[in-house]
Amino acid sequence: MQASAITEAAQLLVAARREARPLKELPPASQPASFAEAAAIQDAIVALLGETVPAYKVAGLTPEASLWSPILGSTIQANPGRFATSLVPLLGIEAEIAYRLKDDVTAADRGMTMAELDARTIIVPTIEVVDTRFVSYDQTPVLHRAADFMSNGGLVYGEPWADGGKQDLTQLAIKLYAGDKLICDTVGGLVAKDPRIPTLAFIQAPGRPDFLPAGTLITAGSYTGLLYAKPGDKVTARFAGYGELSVSFPA
């Protein structure tokens, strides 16, 4: 993929974000054909926006299959979160577990083991806000979604879970409410089972950013699946053994 095509895709996605004009699709020459190309578009978007990247969302069970996306500093909020509906109109919500790095992770840490991951991170429950810069989330190809920050709209994070490492997160129970209505009641709903698996795969991935500073959050996938709020909703995620996070969407 030529540099000009990467720039064009990034400019279109930035304009869609800033002008609230979703794209039907990317032009043929600017459509990513691999995750590496999608990641290059992500990087170009970050540069055009002049944003910081204090967090990543990740997926994939092995380093070779790892997918990731920056989460922009301007879209990250401490619990309780609040996002104007106009900024994230898809209103997608997912309850997740993230890992905060205790120290810098460099290119030399691609050989990190699971035990080292446990020692060098702390568990932080999150709610991911899902949004898209395309007209249709469902009909947008996966690699186009990847270029569009894997459809991330924002992240709400809680206080560190001090004894989270002692919990069996493969069987974590979460209840998700929209207002007073229970919309998800799940136990161990993460596709990867253990949230450390996609987190470690990202750290070991050959193409991931070489430097991840201390404090970086890595959120490891949804326990609840993608659900949707409505304008005016307050969404609450109750994590068994931890407590709750919330995010509201004023109309």
Image (spheres, rainbow, N blue to C red):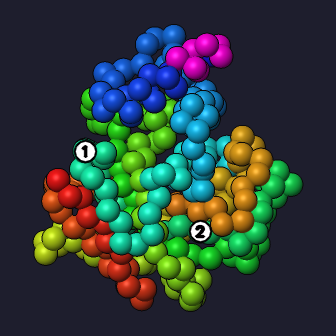
Q: How dense is the environment of label 2, judged by Cα within 10 Å: few (below 14), some, or many (20 and up)?
A: many
Mark 2: amino acid: Tyr
Instruction: Label the magenta part by its dominant secondary structure.
Output: helix
According to the picture, the residue beneath numbered tag 1 turns out to be 86
Q: Secondary structure at mark 2?
A: strand
Residue in the picture at 52% in, 25% down: 10
Name the residue rendered at 43%, 13% in the picture.
Answer: 27
Q: How many marks?
A: 2
Note whether 209 is above or below 227 in the view shown: above
Label 1 sits on what residue type? Ser
In terms of sequence position, does the residue under pointer 1 or pointer 2 come before the other? 1
**Residue 68, can we see it?**
no
Which span of residues is magenta-colored? 2-8
Taking the spot 27% from the left edge, 53% from the top edge, the residue there is 84
Quadrant location of residue 77?
bottom left
Question: CA–CA distance between discs 1 and 2?
Answer: 29 Å
Helix, strand or loop under label 1: loop
Where is residue 13 drawn, in percent x and y?
44, 28
Asked whether 11 or 177 is in front, the reply is: 11
> Quadrant of the rendered structure where residue 225 is?
bottom left
Q: Position of residue 76 (x, y in %)?
A: 47, 58
* Disc assigned to residue 43: none
In the current view of this chain or complex, which residue is farthest to the right? 108
**Residue drawn at point x = 60 percent, y = 48 percent:** 52
Q: Nearer the viewer, residue 45 or 63?
A: 45
- Seen from the viewer's position, the closer of residues 21 and 126 is 21
Residue pointed to by mark 2:
99
State left or right for residue 236 relative to residue 194: left
Of 39 and 214, nearer the camera is: 214
**Where residue 179 appears, x then y in whole percent?**
16, 71
Classify 41 as above or below 28. Answer: below
